[in-house]
Image (cartoon, rainbow, N blue to C red):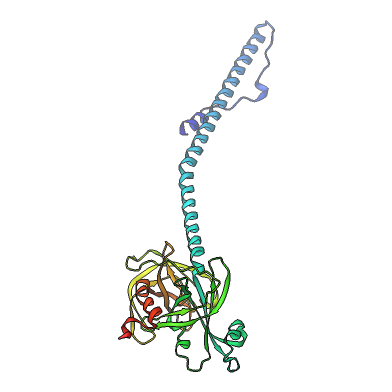
């Protein structure tokens, strides 16, 4: 490029038009001199035009080469980056679409005194019952067993008035929404776990896919699906922030081995699944540290590891109590 610019600077300006004399056919010495001078000027003009044309051609070729070489070096990298971002978005969308039918919404209801004994009517019409709280859960198997936190259904578990109920909102394998009353099958307050059972006659459920929590690593992606603050089918994303944490249990003890995550967990997320990048549940969302006076998640959230859940739930389904309480 420097050479081209140097060539341009070496070209002297063209003479004014009035100095260019037209050629003459006269044979007089003076006219012959003028004709010779005019012919010389014309040749100079032609040479300069050719030089300008050549220079412009060189500049255009250089710019074309520079533009093409720049695009050829940047475009593939940029296209690859865009493609990777699109693939990541598609993966998250697919995880949500795959898992959300296995997540349920739980309402903790208190019937009015006049509604006692008419459970179905009260459950079908929420106006006949007071909503005491909400939570989440996930489908354990095709028989209608639902896993959630004990603290989500604690009022029903300790109810002595006969007015407490749980209403479970589900989606079947065909995508049809329906709701049923949830009956407590068993619970373990020490691990903040409980199992509900709903009548699924006429509906085929889609159980959640189980992963493992023993091979988790800090920094890997995770996703929480639930119903925070009553907003159904909410997805939040984050990473595994810590492992082996200890959190308080409802019975006053401690739950060890908890998973810490920055995926947002708020009231209503409790009992919902924490999912890995393969769409497998790795924990049950349980607790969050909230900003003082706000009730809003601080980003320090915890889930019960799925390995603990898999060891505990079968005993709750069969016996109604954890293994340690059977003897």
The number of numbered badges drawn on the structure is 0
Outermost residue, left side: 327
- Left or right for 98, reference 243: right
x and y, in percent, of residue 34 in the image: 65, 13
x and y, in percent, of residue 166 in the image: 52, 83
Q: Residue at x 63, y 11 (%)?
A: 33
- Judging depth in this view, the residue of 300 and 251 nearest the camera is 251
Residue 255's place in the image compared with 233, above or below, is: below
- Left or right for 38, reference 10: right
- Left or right for 269, reference 178: left
x and y, in percent, of residue 307 in the image: 35, 71
Residue 63's place in the image compared with 17, above or below, is: below
Residue 62's place in the image compared with 239, above or below, is: above
Residue 203 in view in this figure:
yes
Residue 300 in view in this figure:
no
Q: Residue at x 52, y 70 (%)?
A: 234
Image quadrant where residue 21 sits: top right
Q: Quadrant of the C terminus?
A: bottom left
x and y, in percent, of residue 283 in the image: 40, 72
Outermost residue, top side: 27
- Judging depth in this view, the residue of 240 and 292 nearest the camera is 240
- Judging depth in this view, the residue of 10 and 243 nearest the camera is 243
Q: Residue at x 58, y 94 (%)?
A: 113
């Amino acid at each position: 490029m420097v050479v081209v610019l140097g060539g341009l600077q070496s070209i002297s300006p063209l003479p004014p038009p009035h100095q260019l004399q037209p050629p003459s056919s006269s044979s007089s010495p003076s006219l012959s001199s003028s004709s010779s001078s005019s012919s010389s000027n014309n040749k100079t003009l032609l040479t300069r035009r050719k030089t300008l044309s050549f220079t412009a051609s060189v500049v255009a070729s250089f710019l074309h080469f520079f533009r093409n070489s720049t695009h050829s070096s940047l475009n593939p990298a940029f296209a690859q980056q865009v493609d990777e971002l699109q693939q990541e978005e598609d993966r998250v969308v697919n995880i949500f679409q795959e898992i959300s039918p296995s997540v349920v919404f739980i309402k903790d209801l208190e019937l009015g005194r006049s509604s006692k004994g008419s459970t179905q009517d009260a459950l079908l019409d929420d106006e006949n019952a007071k909503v005491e709280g909400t939570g989440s859960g996930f489908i354990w198997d095709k028989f209608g067993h639902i896993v959630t936190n004990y603290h989500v259904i604690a009022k029903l578990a300790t109810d002595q008035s006969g007015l407490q109920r749980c209403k479970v909102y589900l989606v079947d394998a065909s995508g049809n929404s329906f709701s049923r009353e949830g009956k407590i099958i068993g619970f373990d307050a020490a691990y903040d776990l409980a199992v509900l059972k709903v009548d699924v006659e006429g509906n085929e459920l889609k159980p959640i896919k189980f992963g493992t929590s023993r091979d988790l690593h800090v920094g890997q992606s995770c996703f929480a699906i639930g119903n925070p603050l009553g907003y159904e089918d909410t997805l939040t994303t984050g990473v595994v922030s810590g492992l082996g944490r200890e959190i308080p249990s409802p019975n006053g003890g401690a739950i060890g081995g908890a998973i810490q995550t920055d995926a947002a967990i708020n009231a209503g997320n409790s009992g919902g699944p924490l999912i890995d990048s393969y769409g497998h549940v790795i924990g049950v969302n349980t607790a969050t540290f909230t900003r003082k006076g706000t009730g809003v998640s601080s980003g320090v959230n915890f889930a019960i590891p799925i390995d603990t859940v898999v060891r505990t739930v079968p005993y709750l389904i069969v016996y109604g109590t954890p293994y340690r309480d059977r003897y």
